[in-house]
Amino acid sequence: MSTEDFIDNIMDKDFNSAQGTFADLMSGRIADALEQQKIAVAGTMFGEPEDDAEDLDDDDIEWDEDDANEDDVEEDED
């Protein structure tokens, strides 16, 4: 079934056939979209981790002061 068949059914006022053709078209598109989403989710679960370091701001990074060394911390000398 194709979009042309769907349009032809509507033009011929064969709405029962048009309904079946529409359902077939939509289920095919939904199945394709679902497959793409599965691939995307599997890629995030089992694929290479994305490098999100560029997206982080200083506010996004949590700093544990207990783990900090005195050499690592810069102090302002005003």
Image (cartoon, grey):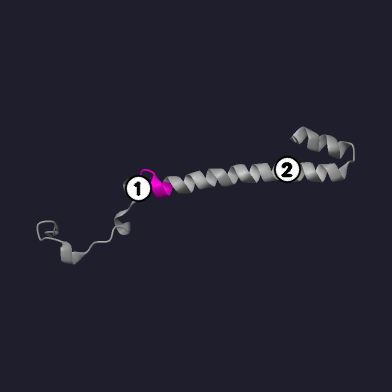
Label 2: element kind: helix
Residue that appears at 62% across and 45% down: 31
Up the image or down, 4 lies above or below 65; here it is above
Mark 1 burial class by Cα count in 10 Å: few <14, some 14-19, many 20+: few
Up the image or down, 61 lies above or below 18; here it is below
Residue that appears at 15% across and 61% down: 68
Name the residue carrying label 1: 52
- Locate the C terminus and report the quarter of the image it occupies: bottom left
Of 69 and 39, the residue lying toward us: 39
Which percent across, then down, holds residue 14? 88, 41
Identify which amino acid the numbered label 2 is placed on. Answer: Asp
Q: Which residues are magenta?
A: 44-51
Q: Residue furthest left?
A: 71
Q: Is residue 29 magenta?
A: no
Label 1: element kind: loop
Identify which amino acid the numbered label 1 is placed on. Answer: Asp
29 left or right, relative to 61:
right
Q: Quadrant of residue 62?
A: bottom left
Q: Is residue 50 magenta?
A: yes
Up the image or down, 38 lies above or below 73; here it is above
Name the residue carrying label 2: 24
